[in-house]
């Protein structure tokens, strides 16, 4: 094969890769939360600028607001969460995030610790996998969570979504996410007020419900991974109306964290300190709106400052983050 033939073959293969990436984006299922921008936006942030990275389910991306956390502490944070994000997927999300960032603190929202290891919906798995850029860690998630016969539809998701061609619109051909950064840093900004029956919780009279050992082992692995990368590790339990169904598991989680020496922030146990108004500070029965998450984040910020010796970086993003805080957060309390 001549040099010219080799160059032609390389050009052809490159064209195939570009075509596959284009098909992947065009046919991908678009979500209201726009995970593609938020997950990809993390990898468009300047390297080594994140002090805190948050992982977990939708309760994470509706609880910790990086704009508020930065305003309160100076710490630069990003939320790498998707709805019902499986714990094994979170582990590889962490590994992928450590490729470009060296956070001082990793926070895991704990909802999936209370769910059976096989608790997994195809839509939630898609929301987790589709936005994640191609990498070894994405392949590992697919291999860990998807049956062999179905993996091709996750490696090449246009095989799953090819029937969407009739509904394609301008949004499907928007490739700006490859370079865009998310002004909310992975947080989902929700303003409607729908109320939730939430209140202070106590565990004295609650019977502990065992947590699957597989889930506990995964939490241990995440803690070890964080520490290997020089980061402290903490768990978070958010506030939601149906928490009464999980109180037994949360009580077990408290005991596990005490035994393992893992810091745990439970908003339900500290509900009265948050200053929440259940009729105004929730988007629905399971998630805070932006006003509620701002209150929760301010309380979380105080706990982080008291529990960890984290010195915030000073960098060029500070003015931009504060400008976004002024635009989106201050009006919530006007």
Image (cartoon, rainbow, N blue to C red):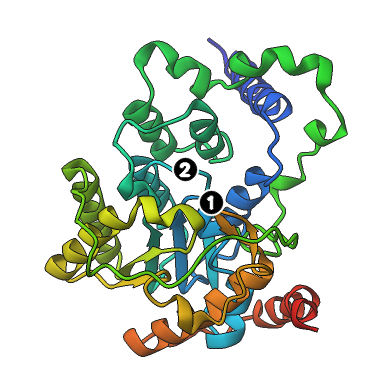
Question: Is residue 136 or residue 238 the one in the foreground?
Answer: 238
Q: Residues within 10 Å of mark 2 (few under 14, many from 20)?
A: many
Q: Secondary structure at mark 1?
A: helix
Q: Of the numbered discs in the image, which one, if any, rests on residue 84?
A: 2
Q: Residues within 10 Å of mark 1 (few under 14, many from 20)?
A: many
Instruction: Give percent across and percent down for residue 154.
Output: 50, 23
Chain-order first, disc 2 or disc 1: 1
Quarter holding the C terminus? bottom right
The residue positioned farthest toward the right in the image shown:
170
Q: Which residue lies under the disc numbered 1?
A: 58
Residue at 40% from the left image edge and 83% from the top image edge: 303
Classify residue 214 by image quadrant. top left
Q: Is residue 253 left or right of residue 136?
A: left
Q: Are marks 2 and 1 in contact (CB under 8 Å)?
A: yes
- At x 53%, y 75%, the residue is 296
Spatial CA distance of label 2 from label 1 is 7 Å
């Amino acid at each position: 094969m001549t040099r010219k033939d080799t160059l032609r073959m390389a050009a052809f293969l490159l064209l195939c890769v570009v075509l596959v990436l284009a098909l992947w984006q065009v046919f991908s299922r678009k979500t209201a939360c726009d995970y593609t921008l938020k997950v990809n936006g993390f990898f468009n942030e300047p390297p080594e600028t994140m002090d805190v990275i948050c992982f977990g389910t939708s309760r994470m991306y509706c609880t910790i607001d990086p704009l508020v956390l930065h305003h309160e502490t100076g710490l630069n944070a990003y939320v790498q969460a998707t709805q019902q994000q499986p714990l094994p997927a979170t582990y590889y999300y962490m590994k992928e995030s450590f490729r470009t960032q060296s956070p001082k603190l990793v926070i895991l929202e704990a909802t999936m610790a209370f769910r059976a290891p096989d608790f997994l919906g195809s839509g939630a798995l898609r929301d987790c996998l589709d936005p994640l850029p191609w990498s070894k860690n994405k392949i590992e998630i697919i291999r860990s969570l998807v049956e062999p016969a179905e993996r091709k539809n996750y490696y090449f998701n246009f095989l799953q979504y090819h029937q969407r061609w009739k509904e394609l619109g301008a949004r499907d051909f928007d490739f700006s996410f490859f370079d865009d950064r998310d002004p909310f840093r992975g947080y989902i900004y929700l303003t409607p007020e729908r109320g939730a029956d939430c209140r202070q919780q106590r565990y004295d009279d609650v019977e502990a419900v065992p947590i699957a050992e597989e889930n506990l082992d995964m939490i241990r692995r995440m803690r070890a991974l964080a520490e290997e990368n020089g980061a402290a590790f903490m768990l978070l339990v958010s506030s939601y109306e149906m928490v009464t169904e999980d109180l037994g598991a949360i009580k077990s989680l408290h005991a596990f964290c005490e035994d393992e020496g893992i810091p745990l922030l439970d908003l339900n146990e500290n509900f009265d300190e948050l200053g929440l108004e259940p009729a105004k500070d929730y988007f629905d029965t399971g998630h805070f709106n932006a006003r509620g998450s701002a209150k929760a984040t301010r309380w979380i910020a105080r706990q982080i400052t008291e529990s960890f010796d984290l010195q915030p970086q000073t960098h060029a993003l500070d003015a931009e983050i504060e400008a976004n805080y002024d635009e989106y957060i201050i009006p919530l309390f006007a």
